[in-house]
Amino acid sequence: MPAFDLVIRNARAVTASDIFDCDIAVKDGRIVQLGQDLPGGTREIDAAGRHVTPGGVDAHCHLDQPEPPPVRMADDFDTGTRSAACGGTTTVIPFALQHKGQSLRDAVADYHQRAEGKAHVDYTFHLIVSDPTPKVLEEELPALIREGYTSFKIYMTYDSLKLDDGQILDVLSVAREHGAMAMIHAENADCIEWLTRRLEAAGRTAPRYHAHARPMLVEREATHRAIALSELVDVPILIVHVSGKEAVEQIRWARAHGLNVFAETCPQYLFLSAEDLGIDDSYHGAKCVCSPPPRDKSNQRVIWQGLADGLFTVFSSDHAPYRFDGDDGKKAGGEEQPFRHIPNGIPGIETRMALLWSEGVMAGRITPQKFVELTSTNPAKAYGLHPRKGSLAVGADADLVIWDEREFVLRNSQLHHNVDYTPYEGMHLTAWPGMTLARGEVVWDGSRFTGRAGAGRFLHCGHPTLLPRVAAPRPAR
Ligand code: URP
Ligand code: ZN
Ligand code: ZN
């Protein structure tokens, strides 16, 4: 009887700190030994000296999130996690969204139903808090944090979701007291509305004007304010989808002043620019409408620099899947929409890892270790999943990617999401996962998806471990 269920031979293993050659032994879905010339397994895979990294943890993606009709997200937990697996991601963290007036518990229950029996890889939820009533703040949120929902997103923009500064302070206080991670979407809603109305009055409603309505300064101002609010409450925050220089400068300032401000960026801020929203009034630009919008090449360089030098903690996809054609996506109701009504978001759950390995590691901009830190280890730590997820170590889940380094041209037809385009169509890439394993099972063999709906399990999260846990203050007597 072989000692192990699986042995991966001749791996060039990469962790967030090291690269070393070893065999990797797996039993009952976990890594049980790393070493040279390990005894045999029931199954053997020869990595042939290729890089082996921990599976990706995509800590910011949207799957089957309820939308006002006729808009619908194109990916649910089935197609979304299938696409994730084929792109080397083995844990996803989408959002259980609370509508205003809705109990947070109901939002979580609804989201569990949407995921039940469908996921191909492990998953957990961030909460989106849009209605911080006394009941939410005093009862529901603390109880949910205790039950393993230890992160939530708050919005400074979008009418249906945004919180005012007082509400943000209330929610951040709960994060501080109960040890949760608060993610903040930082854009100034009033400036965006004012600019949008002026653009509309001038007849400028094509997709490209989305970027004019959300210039860098609206992100800079809100980032500055989010930092100040977190300083007032004395709680770490994580600013999501940072798009360029002026927001980066605010975060560098905060760090230089000893504040615990973490930051996330996404592929769209490395590989897309405002020109992708259109240089004329063509509706094709709707494919790249997301918020914050992509900026320009000089901002892309600033984002690369921040990935390399530690400014960014996490690299996520912000996969927000809407079809281009049809009546439930970018052309809601089948009609081309003024930019105000174009669903915000672009697909990217499958391409996140390969884009960063190709243009980051292969192009020499970041080390393989930095890649692992950004795509897997840090997101697992930020959201209380480490060391079970995000590590290539004894005791961790055997979530692994064996990398194929080869040149090819990316086409949407190769992808497994349910979206009818990729913003990265025609890009030349130099790497793609040659194999993805989720808890020791092959879910992508380099040419075929081999997973099973329902194999992905819900994960209860612990407290974030990016920092030592600071004890909550004693209540005043
Ligand atoms: O445009 C975006 N980013 N859509 C997804 C929702 C969000 O704010 O992350
Ligand atoms: Zn956002
Ligand atoms: Zn998002």
Image (cartoon, rainbow, N blue to C red):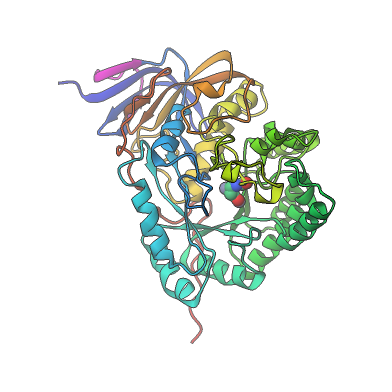
Residue 386 location in percent, x, y? 43, 45
From this viewpoint, is residue 55 visible?
no
Magenta part of the protein: which range? 33-45
In the image, what residue occupies the spot 63% across and 27% down? Answer: 424
Location of the N terminus by quadrant is top left
Furthest-left residue in this view: 1
Residue 20 location in percent, x, y? 47, 23
Residue 112 location in percent, x, y? 36, 52
Question: Quick check: is 176 in the magenta stretch?
Answer: no
In the image, what residue occupies the spot 35% across and 37% down? Answer: 397
Furthest-bottom residue in this view: 477
In the image, what residue occupies the spot 32% across and 43% down? Answer: 457
Comparing 295 with 438, the one in front is: 295
* In the image, residue 402 above or below residue 167: above
Furthest-front residue in this view: 334
* In the image, residue 37 above or below residue 184: above
Q: Is residue 233 left or right of residue 55?
A: right
